[in-house]
Image (tube, helix red, strand yellow):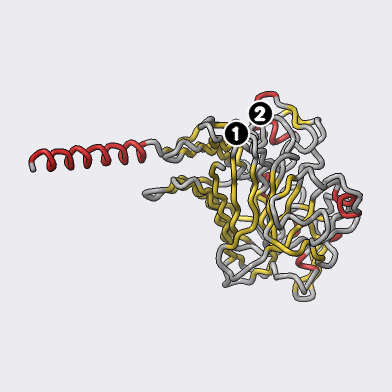
Amino acid sequence: MKKNILAIALLFVFVLSCDTKRKSTQSVQHDSFGVMPDGTAIEQYTLTNANGIEMKVITYGGIITSLKVPDRDGNFADVVLGYDNLEGYLEQNPYFGAIIGRYGNRIAKGVFTLDSVQYKLAQNNIGNHLHGGDVGFDKVVWRAESISTENTIGLKLTYRSKDMEEGYPGNLDITVNYILDDDNTLTFEYFATTDKKTIVNLTNHAYYNLTGKSRDILGHELIINTGEYLPVDSTLIPLQPESVTGTPFDFSKPKTIGKDIEADHVQLKNGGGYDHCWIINKTGDALNFAASLYDPGSGRFMEIFTTEPGIQFYSGNFLDGTITGKGGVVYNFRTGLCLETQHYPDSPNRPEFPTTTLNPGEEYKTKTVTKFSIK
């Protein structure tokens, strides 16, 4: 009997020590990441969960500069594109890892109307407005503070976008939470309020490469939970929804990105590959499965769940070898891909699309969960 009691006690101590060790590996640290031309200091926060997954975020643009996850052999590698220093992000940044807003994606001709008032925005992409304009949320400095619970660590980022900043009406107060859980999920939470009727469509623009190496992403297997996508015109403004059935845009079952990307299809020509929004099969306003991505070589697997109605899949078509990123790696054609949960492009000009209008007294609230695992 005494032996049994002793064994149980030892087992309890062992479990307790393991749990203490597990929790003790959680950490949030921050250090300097350089100084802006106007003298503003930029900080970098490093979040590490109990399983060793590590994410680095800077206050400039809320940019995720690094995300290290393990492969099937337990080897950790960085699976997002970016730079080693602030200068890279300031000089040439195709939105690597950044918070995008006020409006993620495109608005046709940089014009929209609210209550009979026409607002004109920067035409910074083939005559259209893209990702918030010349100085979108990817190029501003966010205020940051660490947040945590028993099983999560995270970063709370806040910013006030002033009335008529980049042409948008209303003082918009934004909070973006990055939350890293011990079950290896990364949650993106977006909140905003305004004092004047406006439009909002926030997302994150991380470029993923699950190989953790400087190779293209054509061998990744992708699933998108949808039956329809939005074809685009030659300037990437959406047309009417179309079925994916029988087209290169059908990712309803696992398919390598490279399988159909060079097919003779007008939409692949318009986008230079995949640069389109898919309409997610939704069963309600709660989190819905949107997409999954798998790298057979490393075994890394990620699943995306969101409250948003759409997901933009961009296959890195404009990466052309002119950018040298982290560790001196040259980012060649299709070295990374983006899976941006969001409302549809040009929604402010398309009343048939889900609305992106935010009124005073309302709260913009959206959530995306990315879960990392091994297959």
Q: Position of residue 262 (x, y in %)?
A: 86, 44
Residue 251 numbered tag: none
Question: Going by the picture, which residue comes out furthest to the left?
Answer: 2
Q: Position of residue 267 (x, y in %)?
A: 87, 54
Residue at (55, 66) in percent of width and height: 286
Q: Is residue 50 among the parts visible in the rendering?
A: yes
Which residue position holds label 2?
326
Q: Quadrant of residue 230?
A: bottom right
Which amino acid type is marked by label 2?
Answer: Lys
Q: Position of residue 119 (x, y in %)?
A: 79, 65
Tag 1's secondary structure? strand
Q: Is residue 155 among the parts visible in the rendering?
A: no
Which one is nearer the viewer's eye here, 239 or 69? Answer: 69
C-beta proximity under 8 Å, tags 1 and 2: yes
Q: Is residue 273 shown above or below 69?
A: below
Quadrant location of the C terminus in the rendered image:
top right
Quadrant location of the N terminus in the rendered image:
top left
Q: Earlier in the sequence, mark 1 or mark 2?
A: 1
Tag 2's secondary structure? helix
Residue 78 numbered tag: 1
- Mark 1 packing: few (<14 Cα in 10 Å), some, or many (20+)? many
Residue at (64, 35) in percent of width and height: 297
Which amino acid type is marked by label 1?
Answer: Asp
Q: Is residue 43 left or right of residue 342?
A: left
Residue at (67, 59) in percent of width and height: 225
Q: Is residue 370 left or right of residue 246?
A: left
